[in-house]
Image (tube, rainbow, N blue to C red):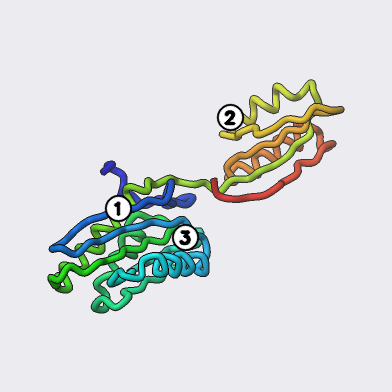
Amino acid sequence: MSPDFFCYVETGMRTIVGEAEIKTEVKRSRFIGRSFIRSTPDEALAAVKTLRASEPGATHHCWAYRLGRDGEQARYHDDGEPQGTAGPPILEVLKKNGVTNVLLVVTRYFGGVKLGAGGLVRAYGDAAKRVLEKSGLKNLRWMVEAEAEVPYPLLGTFESFLAGEDAEVTGKTYGEHVTIRLRLPAAREEALREYYAALTSGQSSLLILGRDFR
């Protein structure tokens, strides 16, 4: 496990790299942890419903999700396990790692031996932790995508500015002017606007195409 696995990211957004599945066994009970990338409650609940239908023989499908930019939408379900022994420890793993837009489902096939409340909390929490680690974590930044028309003589100067602002040029179109499509951190949007206005003496406009996490 990487040293910063449990570090919370205070800026931007943290989510998983990809969906994953793990399997563990505790006193003959089999636990299957699965991660899903979802962005709305409806999407998350649909994933749980599909999983239930695909594995009707499972004893429990316990889950938790955190959604939204700051994980403001959070929900869990014990699915028949003693109250607070399954859903909350799964949700706690999501909270502790600061991840969002993630659904974790831990499926249990009962093995005949009761684990007790403490044992269940540990088993579900461990399965959630393992599948989240296998999924990998990535930090996303709030980015701006923009389009700018630049006269040919100013192209080199403008590109040098972009390089210093951690911007990525995603496309160029050559015509009467060079149309540059770019992406940069939203925190640098105002600097881009001011520089572009000064560079073109206010004769050209900067077009903001959108903002999202990347």
Residue 85 is marked as none
Asked if the residue at tag 1 contacts the one at tag 2, i.e. Cβ–Cβ closer than 8 Å, the answer is: no
Residue drawn at (26%, 58%), measured in percent from left and top?
A: 127
Report the residue marked by disc 1: 22
Residue drawn at (73%, 35%), measured in percent from left and top?
A: 196
The residue most toward the right is 176
Q: Identify residue type, mark 2.
A: Gly
User: In terms of image quadrants, where is residue 23?
Assistant: bottom left
Residue drawn at (27%, 75%), measured in percent from left and top?
A: 84
The answer to whether 135 appears left or right of 179 in the picture is left
Q: Identify residue type, mark 3.
A: Asp
Q: Identify residue type, mark 1.
A: Ile
Report the residue marked by disc 3: 70
Asked if the residue at tag 3 contacts the one at tag 2, i.e. Cβ–Cβ closer than 8 Å, the answer is: no
Foreground mark, 2 or 3, reads 3
For label 2, the SS is: helix
CA distance for labels 3 and 1? 26 Å
> In the rendered view, would you say 169 is above or below 153?
below
Please give the count of numbered marks on the rendered protein.
Answer: 3
| Residue 87 makes an appearance in the image | no
User: In terms of image quadrants, where is residue 194?
Assistant: top right
> Where in the figure is residue 112, as x and y percent of width and height?
15, 71
For label 3, the SS is: loop
Q: Which badge, 2 or 3, is on the more N-terminal residue?
A: 3
